[in-house]
Amino acid sequence: MALLLAACSAPADIRDSRFIMGTLVEFTVAGADEAASTVAITAAANEMQRIENAFTIYGNQNNSVKRFNRSQVGASVQLPEEISTLLATALTIKRESNGAFDPALGRLNRLWGFSLPEAPTSPPSSRAIEQAMPPATCIEKRNSGWARLHETCMLDFGAIAKGYAIDRGIEILRNHGIANAIINAGGDIRLIGSHGDQPWRIGIRHPRNRGEVIQSLELQGDVAVVTSGDYERFYIFKDKRYHHILDPKSGWPANTAQSVTVIAKSAMQADAWSTALFISEGHPDISRNLNIRLLIVNNRGEITKNTL
Ligand code: AMP
Ligand code: MG
């Protein structure tokens, strides 16, 4: 009887969700007191919202990233430590990915407009794209701060900030004593601990069949799973799909993959690398030395690599 009661009174999952970073962010906490979980989730959500406000280049609110993007070419600008650190990480990943990941595509991303409140329905002209393309060396670190080296160089953390925000959200949950939780930001996930005596179960979206899962995973401990896909923000124009992940070499949407999923230690790394490898389709020279697991669906819908 006592055992039965104990089983029945095991706390249920505590769930909550918020709309942050243009997506529904779902928080699930297992095995914890409801009141404490609610406080922890609220704190985590507030931190993630703070990060969105600090990094976004859209909306009316002012922030340091937007000020940097408007700064005089060649002038040194001090950035807050948090932004400076993420920028340094992003530039390292740019180098390691042979330029596939580029945090200075703000101008080009804005031209394509996938993150604008009203996304366009047809591509910009080749001429406009050429004019918005930044040079290979765009952002310079100096003792006195950061400088942009050309009018087209504008920061956009859209491919890494969500992962960073998820990591910070998990850190806040942990600081509140939560040991078992998932933060799921529109399919980009970090999880800690387990779901009772089971691992957490998550599904990777099929890039073409809406509502379908291409692979489900059972994971526990501390792990991040992030997917970049051409189905997230896109339109079809004259039978061709145009989407939000741009190849910095051409200025056009990358066309070698439908989706790339990365499992890594941090959501920030998984976020940046899923974007980078989407562009270079898991280029073996790049992915070999990384401590990550991968699922790649190529542009014909075939799974070409799966180490999940
Ligand atoms: P994700 O959904 O994480 O793959 O990130 C895509 C977002 O990152 C886009 O909406 C852009 O804001 C930005 N972005 C697009 N192409 C790139 C790129 N090649 N490198 C870095 N960021 C990019
Ligand atoms: Mg990304």
Image: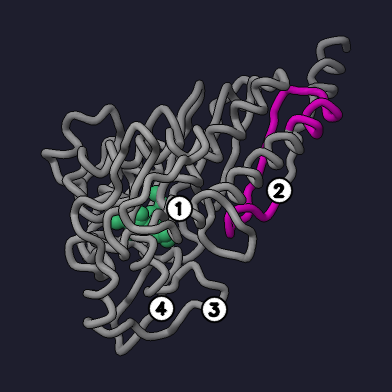
Q: Is residue 255 within the magenta segment? A: no
At x 32%, y 82%, the residue is 124
Q: Earlier in the sequence, mark 2 or mark 3?
A: 2
The three-letter code of the residue at mark 1 reads Phe
Nearer the viewer's eye, disc 2 or disc 1?
A: 1
Q: Quadrant of the N terminus?
A: top right
At x 54%, y 26%, the residue is 199
Nearer the viewer's eye, disc 4 or disc 1?
A: 1
Residue position for label 3: 118
Q: Secondary structure at mark 1?
A: helix
The three-letter code of the residue at mark 3 reads Glu
Q: Earlier in the sequence, mark 4 or mark 3?
A: 3
Extent of the magenta region: 18-40
Q: CA distance from mark 4 to mark 3?
A: 12 Å
Q: Which disc, if any, is residue 235? A: 4
Q: Secondary structure at mark 3?
A: loop
Residues at circles 2 and 3 in contact by the CB criterion of under 8 Å: no
Residue 40 percent coordinates (x, y): 75, 30
- Is 231 located above or below residue 94 in the figure? below
Nearer the viewer's eye, disc 4 or disc 3?
A: 3
Residue 72 percent coordinates (x, y): 39, 58
Residue position for label 2: 17
